[in-house]
Amino acid sequence: MRTKTAAFVLVFMVLILCFSTAFADNLLNITMTDPVTHKTYDINYNNKELRVFDNGKLSGNTYIQDAHGFSMYDNTLYIYYSDFLNHQLFVYCFYFQKDSISSFVINEDAFYNENCYASDGERVYFVWGEDSNFMCVYENGNINKINLKSQITKLLITDKDTLTIHTDDGIFTYKNGEIQNTSPTLLAPETTVYTTECNTENITPETSNGFYVALEGVTVSKIKKAFAKYEITNFTKADGSNINSGKLGTGATFALSTGEVITVVIYGDLTGEGNVNSRDLKALLNHLSRKELLQGSYLISADLDSDGLITTKDLLMLSKMY
């Protein structure tokens, strides 16, 4: 009997040890874009070691005892750790270009959502409440709580003055101390769209001017290959300047020998840069809040779910694209 009991205890202790070891490893790999520099970094956190990679090259590393969440702003990586027992939020500021780190503690009786942390260097945003419905702003030692009356699922800084708050009831923005609900819908234009994968079978001299939906990274040479049956007279970038080679973005045009002018559309590229980044997210936020409306091909690019409407659903999809 004693032998069986001892064996049971031994097995139980081994299971506890294995679980603790697995938990301690805390393996995490994420990709983050700095909303200020617009550079994208790969973050690796494994067995207490934090490593930051820039285009596959190690930019900096340090050791952090525990981490529950990450955010990035202006060349600083913010690491958040919640001490649930003592109701404390530890914020580590890792300046990976210098391999230096600082930290401070926020004391607050709170329930923390691991996906809901953000900081812009002056303020720290986090979620409070058993239902995760309070957005908290920590600034100069003070905490301001705002009840969104809905579960908060994500916090994302888009620029120095704007925080995007994703909730079960939609997307809100926090700016200058005020919460604003984004507009529910704005119509996307009806268009003739050439749906890609280099499909040109439906293009005829009689076809009205339309749009070519391309993948991110499309170039002049790829367009020429896609439209090999037609002579292309010239390429124009979104700003109106001519281009003979290189990458194209939403709003770029090319003219066929038939006289038809076709506009390039890359879903999610709302600035004409040819790739998706935080500037596109800001452009969509400005559109939904009617601060600065998108026009033409940018409206098509913003309709990510292709339902003919520009909504917060498109905003949510865009936020996951970079």
Image: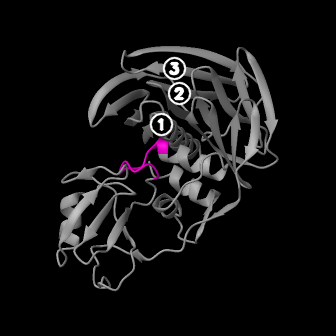
Q: Are the residues at dot 1 and dot 2 in contact (C-beta closer than 8 Å)?
A: no
Does residue 248 lie above or below 206 as drawn?
A: above
Q: Are the residues at dot 3 and dot 1 in contact (C-beta closer than 8 Å)?
A: no
Residue visible at 34% across and 86% down in the picture = 206
Q: Badge 2 is on which residue?
A: 79
Gap between marks 2 and 3 measured at Cα: 7 Å
Looking at the image, tell me whether mark 3 or mark 1 is earlier in sequence order: 1
The residue closer to the viewer here, 27 or 264, is 264
Q: Residues within 10 Å of mark 1 (few under 14, many from 20)?
A: some
Where residue 306 appears, as percent x and y from the top left, is 53, 70
Provide the residue span drawn in magenta: 270-279
Where residue 29 appears, as percent x and y from the top left, is 41, 41
Relative horizontal placement of residue 306, taking residue 86 as reference (left or right): left
Relative horizontal placement of residue 56, taking residue 231 as reference (left or right): right
Gap between marks 1 and 2 measured at Cα: 13 Å
Does residue 29 lie above or below 315 as drawn?
A: above
Q: Amino acid at mark 3?
A: Cys
Which numbered dot is residue 26? 1
Q: Residues within 10 Å of mark 2 (few under 14, many from 20)?
A: many
Residue visible at 52% across and 33% down in the picture = 70
Q: Badge 3 is on which residue?
A: 93
Circle 3 sits in a helix, a strand or a loop, which is it?
strand
Q: Label the magenta part by its dominant secondary structure.
A: loop
Where residue 230 appears, as percent x and y from the top left, is 19, 76
Looking at the image, tell me whether mark 1 or mark 2 is earlier in sequence order: 1
Circle 1 sits in a helix, a strand or a loop, which is it?
loop
